[in-house]
Amino acid sequence: MATEKHGGEQHSPLEQFEIKELVPIEIAGNNISFSNSALMMVITITLILMLMILGTRKRAMIPGRWQALAELCYEFVANLIRDTVGNEGRKYFPFIFALFMFILIGNMLGMVPYSFTFTSHIAVTFAMAMVVFTGVTILGFAKHGIRFFTFFVPPGVPIWMWPLMIPIEIISYLSRPVSLAMRLFANMLAGHTLLKVFAGFVPALGAAGILPLAFVGALTGLELLIAFLQAYVFAILTCLYIDDALHLH
Amino acid sequence: MPQLEQIHTYLGQIFWLFVTFGLLYIVLWKAALPRVSTILQERQERIDEDLRKAEEFKQEADDAIAAYEKLVAEARSQAQTVIRETNVALAADAAARQDALTVRIKADVAEAEARIDKARTEALANIQTVAVEVAQAATIRLIGKDIPTDNAEAAVAAAMRERG
């Protein structure tokens, strides 16, 4: 890691992930400075709220462009929840919608040159994953009480297998937030690093730099797809976890 | 890697994540999503209402068409009846005239035949008189002898009987 950073290159591909404190804030000895990451979060929620509130301002019976986009997002997430959780999932719709849009717009804004991708930081993705994990676990216990533990006993498994299966189930349950956080973080990190590395080849290769340039162009398209896909995966996995907590298998 | 090296920024990142995401969640939950939901619901209701109305109008149109077709069928059957009755009446009239005409023609034919018979009888009578005169004239020329009218008449009548 350190060798990469000081490896002689003027711009490390990882430099883009650096947190820069814009407004230093410290409360009771805790550093909660307003950074470039926080700025992107503020821009993200501003864009989402502008779309959802200003876009639907006219409440038109026949939607205009922005209202159609807002309705498209709404129905996309609504269908996602209906397909995975069913009608009981309506209660969790605002949360899933906020989560999906926050990650989607965060990822997309990260594709803008010289911007910052807050979802490429493990601290942020892990915090989100832990919120989902804790919320779903509380939901499971609130719904089923002590019976929630039966979730760790796979149905149809003979009793002598239980000592083996129950620890596996518990470990797989506890690894959910880790996989959820790592998936988003690693995808964003790898994609952006790759883009930066190949972009670095363009000036280095001179006239042949057209090749890495073309590759960067194609890769940008792929990254846009991944930006959407990861937001979708995060949202759909959260739905599936909620479904598990509600229905226990 | 800054993600793992800048540990002192973790708290700030998470703090601002919770602040921004919390704000986003609350505004979406309380204001934005209910509004979109209302818009979609109102549109759905409007569409359902319009479909229901369209169904009603279609029903009305179907009823009107059925009434119209019934009317046309009635008119047609009435027209058929009138045509049939008229045909019957015309046929009867024609037959009556035909009969009257036939009677008149027969009467005319009978009258004409009677006239023809009379004419022929007269003609035959005339022929006898002329024949008698011709016979007398011929006798004078041939033998220079005048025969009495009675004898000539008897001879002509005998000759005519002979020839039929």
Image: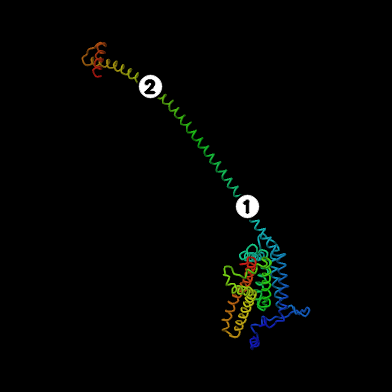
Say which chain tag 1 marks: B
Q: Which quarter shows the N terminus of chain A?
A: bottom right
Q: Amino acid at mark 1?
A: Arg
Q: Is residue A34 above or below residue B109?
A: below
Tell me the residue that label 1 is attached to: B52
Q: Quadrant of the C terminus of chain A?
A: bottom right
Please name whichever residue, A145 or B79, is drawn nearer the observer in this view of the structure.
A145
Is A147 or A215 nearer to us in this picture?
Answer: A147
Q: Residue at the spot x=41%, y=26% of the render?
A: B102
The 10 Å Cα crowd at callout 1, few under 14, some 14 to 19, many 20 or more, is few
Instruction: Provide residue A220's location: percent of width, then percent of height.
Output: 60, 76
Which residue corresponds to mark 2?
A: B110
Instruction: Give coordinates of residue B157: x percent, y percent.
Output: 26, 15
Q: Helix, strand or loop at disc 1?
A: helix
As displayed, is residue B108 above or below residue A228?
above
Q: Which mark is residue A136?
A: none
Mark 2 residue type: Ala
Mark toward the start of the polypeptide (1 vs 2): 1
- Can you name the residue that lies furthest to the right here? A28
Q: Position of residue B162 (x, y in %)?
A: 23, 17
Local crowd at mark 2 within 10 Å, few (<14), some, or many (≥20)?
few
Q: Residue at x 59, y 69 (%)?
A: A154
Left/right of residue A28 with respect to residue A237 in the rendered view? right
